[in-house]
Image: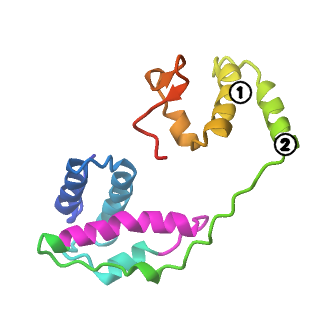
Amino acid sequence: MNFISTFAPYIIGLIEQKQALGYKYQSEQSILRRFDLYCLEHHPLATKLTNEIITEWAIKRPNESLSTVQCRLSPVRELAKYMLRMGFEAYIMPKGLMPRVPKYMPYIYSNNELKRIFEQTDRCNYCYEVPYRHWIMPIFFRLLYCSGMRATEARLLKVDDVNLVNGVITADNLLL
Protein backbone atom coordinates (compact mmCIF):
# COMPACT_ATOMS: atom_id res chain seq x y z
CA MET A 1 0.00 0.00 0.00
CA ASN A 2 1.42 3.36 -1.00
CA PHE A 3 1.39 6.33 1.35
CA ILE A 4 2.20 9.74 -0.09
CA SER A 5 1.45 12.50 2.42
CA THR A 6 4.13 14.12 4.52
CA PHE A 7 3.18 11.61 7.24
CA ALA A 8 3.92 8.61 4.99
CA PRO A 9 7.24 7.63 6.64
CA TYR A 10 5.59 7.57 10.08
CA ILE A 11 2.57 5.64 8.85
CA ILE A 12 4.82 3.06 7.18
CA GLY A 13 6.98 2.86 10.31
CA LEU A 14 3.94 2.31 12.54
CA ILE A 15 2.52 -0.41 10.29
CA GLU A 16 5.90 -2.18 10.08
CA GLN A 17 6.26 -1.99 13.87
CA LYS A 18 2.76 -3.38 14.50
CA GLN A 19 3.25 -6.20 12.00
CA ALA A 20 6.69 -7.02 13.45
CA LEU A 21 4.95 -7.42 16.81
CA GLY A 22 2.59 -9.97 15.25
CA TYR A 23 -0.49 -7.82 14.59
CA LYS A 24 -2.16 -8.23 11.19
CA TYR A 25 -2.92 -4.49 11.20
CA GLN A 26 -4.84 -4.68 7.91
CA SER A 27 -8.04 -2.76 8.66
CA GLU A 28 -5.95 -0.16 10.51
CA GLN A 29 -3.66 0.10 7.49
CA SER A 30 -6.70 0.81 5.33
CA ILE A 31 -7.85 3.55 7.73
CA LEU A 32 -4.36 5.05 7.76
CA ARG A 33 -4.41 5.04 3.95
CA ARG A 34 -7.60 7.14 4.03
CA PHE A 35 -6.02 9.41 6.64
CA ASP A 36 -2.94 9.76 4.42
CA LEU A 37 -5.13 10.81 1.46
CA TYR A 38 -7.08 13.17 3.72
CA CYS A 39 -3.83 14.84 4.85
CA LEU A 40 -2.57 15.05 1.29
CA GLU A 41 -5.77 16.78 0.19
CA HIS A 42 -6.43 19.05 3.19
CA HIS A 43 -2.99 19.59 4.78
CA PRO A 44 -0.42 18.84 2.04
CA LEU A 45 2.42 20.80 3.68
CA ALA A 46 1.82 19.76 7.28
CA THR A 47 4.88 18.37 9.06
CA LYS A 48 3.27 18.10 12.49
CA LEU A 49 0.22 16.12 13.46
CA THR A 50 -1.70 19.03 14.97
CA ASN A 51 -4.86 19.36 17.02
CA GLU A 52 -6.49 20.97 13.97
CA ILE A 53 -5.75 18.00 11.68
CA ILE A 54 -6.92 15.44 14.23
CA THR A 55 -10.05 17.41 15.15
CA GLU A 56 -11.06 17.76 11.49
CA TRP A 57 -10.43 14.04 10.93
CA ALA A 58 -12.59 13.24 13.99
CA ILE A 59 -15.71 14.97 12.67
CA LYS A 60 -18.56 12.49 12.36
CA ARG A 61 -19.61 12.03 8.76
CA PRO A 62 -23.17 11.59 7.52
CA ASN A 63 -24.42 8.04 7.99
CA GLU A 64 -21.43 7.19 10.21
CA SER A 65 -21.99 5.65 13.63
CA LEU A 66 -20.08 6.70 16.73
CA SER A 67 -18.35 3.32 16.86
CA THR A 68 -17.16 3.81 13.26
CA VAL A 69 -15.74 7.22 14.19
CA GLN A 70 -13.92 5.67 17.13
CA CYS A 71 -12.56 2.89 14.89
CA ARG A 72 -11.37 5.53 12.44
CA LEU A 73 -9.67 7.53 15.22
CA SER A 74 -7.89 4.68 16.96
CA PRO A 75 -5.14 4.05 14.34
CA VAL A 76 -4.53 7.80 14.07
CA ARG A 77 -4.08 7.98 17.87
CA GLU A 78 -1.56 5.14 17.51
CA LEU A 79 0.18 7.09 14.75
CA ALA A 80 0.47 10.14 17.02
CA LYS A 81 1.90 8.01 19.83
CA TYR A 82 4.37 6.45 17.40
CA MET A 83 5.47 9.86 16.14
CA LEU A 84 6.03 11.08 19.70
CA ARG A 85 8.11 7.98 20.48
CA MET A 86 10.19 8.76 17.39
CA GLY A 87 10.79 12.30 18.65
CA PHE A 88 8.37 14.18 16.39
CA GLU A 89 5.56 16.52 17.38
CA ALA A 90 2.08 15.04 17.33
CA TYR A 91 -1.21 15.75 19.03
CA ILE A 92 -2.90 12.79 20.68
CA MET A 93 -6.64 13.21 20.95
CA PRO A 94 -7.67 12.35 24.51
CA LYS A 95 -9.73 9.16 24.72
CA GLY A 96 -12.70 10.65 26.58
CA LEU A 97 -13.23 13.46 24.06
CA MET A 98 -15.53 11.41 21.83
CA PRO A 99 -19.00 10.51 23.12
CA ARG A 100 -19.34 7.01 24.48
CA VAL A 101 -20.79 4.43 22.17
CA PRO A 102 -24.06 3.14 23.59
CA LYS A 103 -23.62 -0.30 25.06
CA TYR A 104 -24.63 -3.01 22.63
CA MET A 105 -27.78 -4.80 23.65
CA PRO A 106 -27.95 -8.24 22.01
CA TYR A 107 -31.20 -9.46 20.58
CA ILE A 108 -32.19 -12.99 21.60
CA TYR A 109 -34.19 -14.73 18.90
CA SER A 110 -37.17 -16.84 19.92
CA ASN A 111 -37.33 -20.48 18.83
CA ASN A 112 -40.03 -19.51 16.33
CA GLU A 113 -37.86 -16.73 14.85
CA LEU A 114 -34.90 -19.11 14.54
CA LYS A 115 -37.10 -21.70 12.86
CA ARG A 116 -38.27 -19.10 10.32
CA ILE A 117 -34.70 -17.91 9.66
CA PHE A 118 -33.50 -21.44 8.95
CA GLU A 119 -36.56 -22.25 6.84
CA GLN A 120 -35.84 -19.15 4.76
CA THR A 121 -32.14 -19.99 4.28
CA ASP A 122 -33.15 -23.54 3.29
CA ARG A 123 -35.25 -21.98 0.48
CA CYS A 124 -32.21 -20.29 -1.06
CA ASN A 125 -32.42 -21.03 -4.80
CA TYR A 126 -29.73 -21.84 -7.30
CA CYS A 127 -28.27 -18.77 -9.00
CA TYR A 128 -25.87 -19.10 -11.93
CA GLU A 129 -23.94 -16.00 -10.76
CA VAL A 130 -23.27 -17.63 -7.37
CA PRO A 131 -23.62 -21.34 -8.15
CA TYR A 132 -23.04 -22.77 -4.65
CA ARG A 133 -25.00 -20.21 -2.66
CA HIS A 134 -28.04 -22.47 -2.22
CA TRP A 135 -25.79 -25.01 -0.44
CA ILE A 136 -23.62 -22.56 1.48
CA MET A 137 -26.21 -20.22 2.99
CA PRO A 138 -28.04 -22.82 5.12
CA ILE A 139 -24.72 -24.14 6.44
CA PHE A 140 -23.31 -20.65 6.97
CA PHE A 141 -26.24 -19.47 9.10
CA ARG A 142 -26.26 -22.67 11.15
CA LEU A 143 -22.51 -22.33 11.70
CA LEU A 144 -22.99 -18.78 12.98
CA TYR A 145 -25.80 -19.92 15.26
CA CYS A 146 -24.04 -22.99 16.66
CA SER A 147 -20.50 -21.62 17.02
CA GLY A 148 -20.99 -18.00 18.00
CA MET A 149 -18.57 -16.92 15.28
CA ARG A 150 -18.79 -13.50 13.78
CA ALA A 151 -19.90 -13.41 10.15
CA THR A 152 -16.44 -12.26 9.01
CA GLU A 153 -14.75 -15.11 10.88
CA ALA A 154 -17.01 -17.70 9.27
CA ARG A 155 -16.62 -16.08 5.84
CA LEU A 156 -12.81 -16.31 6.09
CA LEU A 157 -12.72 -20.01 7.01
CA LYS A 158 -10.71 -22.29 4.76
CA VAL A 159 -11.28 -26.01 4.17
CA ASP A 160 -8.11 -26.78 6.18
CA ASP A 161 -9.62 -24.96 9.19
CA VAL A 162 -12.38 -27.57 9.54
CA ASN A 163 -11.71 -31.03 10.99
CA LEU A 164 -14.89 -33.02 10.33
CA VAL A 165 -13.54 -36.15 12.04
CA ASN A 166 -13.06 -34.44 15.42
CA GLY A 167 -15.72 -31.77 14.90
CA VAL A 168 -13.23 -28.95 15.49
CA ILE A 169 -12.76 -25.61 13.74
CA THR A 170 -9.42 -23.84 14.13
CA ALA A 171 -8.41 -20.74 12.22
CA ASP A 172 -6.00 -17.83 12.55
CA ASN A 173 -8.75 -15.33 11.73
CA LEU A 174 -10.92 -16.28 14.72
CA LEU A 175 -11.10 -13.44 17.22
CA LEU A 176 -12.85 -15.43 19.97
Labels in figure, total: 2
Is residue 118 visible in the rendered image? The answer is yes
Foreground of the two, 80 or 20: 20
* Label 1 Cα neighbours within 10 Å, binned few <14 / some 14-19 / many ≥20: some
Q: Name the amino acid, label 1.
A: Pro
Is residue 38 visible in the rendered image? The answer is no
Q: Which residue is mark 2?
A: 111
* Label 2 Cα neighbours within 10 Å, binned few <14 / some 14-19 / many ≥20: few
Provide residue 120's location: percent of width, then percent of height.
82, 32
Based on the picture, tell me whether residue 117 belongs to the magenta stretch.
no
Q: Residue at x 16, y 59 (%)?
A: 9
- Image quadrant of residue 131? top right
Q: Is residue 105 above or below residue 97?
A: above
Image position of 56 (left or right of 45): right
Foreground of the two, 108 or 88: 108
Q: Is residue 127 above or below residue 175?
A: above
Q: Which residues are magenta?
A: 59-83
Marks 1/2 in contact by CB < 8 Å: the verdict is no
Q: Magenta residues: mostly which secondary structure?
A: helix
Query: Which label lies toward us, 1 or 2?
Result: 2
Q: Residue at x 50, y 24 (%)?
A: 162
Q: Name the amino acid, label 2.
A: Asn
Q: Which residue is mark 1?
A: 138
Provide residue 76's location: percent of width, then percent of height.
33, 67
